[in-house]
Amino acid sequence: MPNYYYDGSFDGLLTVIFIAYKDRKNNELRIIVKTGQLLLGLDDINVITNFSKARRVEKAICDKLSQNFLNNIQTCFLSCDKNKDIVIVHTVYKALKQGKEILNSLDEHAFYVNKLVKQVLNERHRYLGVLRFKEVKDGTMFSTIEPKNNVLPILLSHFINRMKREKFAIYDKKRKIIAYYDTKKVEIFFVKSLEIEWSDEEIEYSELWKTFHKSISIKERENKKLQQSNLPKYYWKHLIEDM
């Protein structure tokens, strides 16, 4: 059974779906993201992302299933789960044969997809509540996140709608990617390192907020377990008040 190696992009995975169609019934199908220098076995396949083939698969999913089905697998693709690629591919193959209702069934692959979609959307929801912006020297509003899943792409529309006239940047520290909105368009790119200079006003406001937060807290009523049940400690590290 060949291993299908691809570049880790969503269009790359759609290309795999197109090319691996002949192996769709094989439960031992393996899909691997290429890293570093690639040494292929005799039966291994190096999948080169083909945008034309990707669009054909995308169109087939929308026409034969639905736009919502496509949205679900796009969301699933943002998961950090190591099995996301294979469950997406098998779910698409089964759905094209059996219909979109498979997502409401107990099929093992479709069930896994639904679980990952829920995890990604839950993490997005948490970040909508805790993401904090700070002002840098040039007036841009800046925020740092370290999500388990790649939720940055699905956070942007919310903040663009809320901050249409503000320049802002959101930095995913874990993946070294940053999204920058200049009030007209969004660009996402990789960065190796960042040096941030906060504005004088931001430094002052941050200190005032920490002082305020400390002054209103009642030490005898602290309940860390309750805080963690409402918001896991994993999300605390970039809060100004540093719970």
Image (cartoon, rainbow, N blue to C red):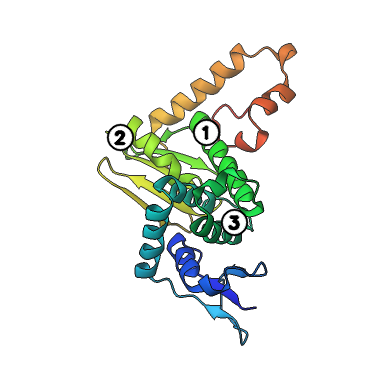
The residue wearing badge 1 is 125
Q: Position of residue 200 (x, y in %)?
A: 39, 31
Helix, strand or loop for disc 3: helix
How many residues crowd around disc 3 within 10 Å: few (fewer than 14), some, or many (20 or more)?
A: some
How many residues crowd around disc 1 within 10 Å: few (fewer than 14), some, or many (20 or more)?
A: few
Residue in the foreground of this view, choosing between 118 and 159 = 118
**In what quadrant of the picture does the C terminus appear?**
top right
Helix, strand or loop for disc 2: loop
Judge depth for marks 2 and 1 and give the one in front.
1
Q: Position of residue 185 (x, y in %)?
A: 28, 46
Q: Residue shown at 72%/24% (left/top)?
A: 224
Q: What's the amino acid at mark 3?
A: Lys
The residue wearing badge 3 is 84
Q: Position of residue 121 (x, y in %)?
A: 53, 39
Q: Residue shown at 66%/33% (left/top)?
A: 232
Q: What's the amino acid at mark 2?
A: Glu
Question: Mark on residue 229?
Answer: none
How many residues crowd around disc 2 within 10 Å: few (fewer than 14), some, or many (20 or more)?
A: some
Does residue 167 appear to the left or right of 124 in the view shown?
left
Q: Position of residue 130 (x, y in %)?
A: 53, 30
CA gap, disc 3 and disc 2? 35 Å
| Residue 70, visible in the rendered structure | yes
Name the image quarter holding residue 61: bottom left
The residue wearing badge 2 is 166
Q: What's the amino acid at mark 1?
A: His
For marks 2 and 1, the one nearer the N-term is 1
CA gap, disc 2 and disc 1? 22 Å
Up-down relation of residue 208 to residue 200 (above or below) = above
CA gap, disc 3 and disc 1? 20 Å
Outermost residue, bottom side: 42
